[in-house]
Amino acid sequence: MFNNWSELLPTIQKAFGALGKSNPKMVKAYMALGEATSENNVLDAKTRELISIAIAVTTRCDGCIAAHTDSAIKAGASREEVTAALATAISLNAGAAYIYSLRSLEAYDALNRPA
């Protein structure tokens, strides 16, 4: 097991609250970002959480994975839907690695020109 997810989530929630006490303005602004995503109701909660899981994977954030997986379950996401979102994240990461490989070669060529 990579993490004890059932222990990680409450630990993060507790730490989140502690940071909020020391910097309430920052946490209020952060929470407003999340609230703003649901304001126009174009995407339902389950879809937003599936997208969030995929983004959490691409940003490699265990806390985000735990929080958004929990929220996706509460929003009714099935394991099959989560795996479809993960497949999308995997395919995008491979594409991003390919594009950034091209950028690296471009940088090499640009920097390796004779003076």
Image (cartoon, rainbow, N blue to C red):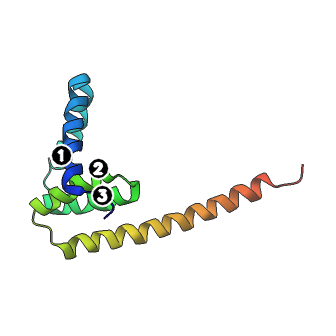
Q: 10 Å neighbourhood of mark 3: few (<14), some, or many (≥20)? A: few
Q: Quadrant of the N terminus?
A: bottom left
Q: Which residue is mark 3?
A: 3
Q: Do residues under tags 1 and 2 come within 8 Å of each other at their CB atoms?
A: no
User: Is there any visible trace of residue 43 in the rendered image?
Assistant: no
Of pointers 3 and 2, the one earlier in the residue sequence: 3
Q: Amino acid at mark 2?
A: Gly
Residue extending farthest to the right is 115
Q: Which residue is mark 1?
A: 10
Q: CA distance from mark 3 to mark 2?
A: 10 Å
Q: Amino acid at mark 3?
A: Asn
Q: CA distance from mark 1 to mark 3?
A: 13 Å
Q: Secondary structure at mark 3?
A: loop
Q: Do residues under tags 3 and 2 come within 8 Å of each other at their CB atoms?
A: no
Q: Residue at x 19, y 33 (%)?
A: 17
Q: Residue at x 16, y 57 (%)?
A: 70
Residue in front for this viewpoint, 33 or 54: 54
User: Is there any visible trace of residue 108 in the rendered image?
Assistant: yes
Q: Secondary structure at mark 2?
A: helix
Q: Which residue is mark 2?
A: 63
Of pointers 1 and 2, the one earlier in the residue sequence: 1
Q: Position of residue 77 (x, y in %)?
A: 14, 68
Q: Do residues under tags 1 and 3 come within 8 Å of each other at their CB atoms?
A: no
Q: Position of residue 105 (x, y in %)?
A: 69, 62
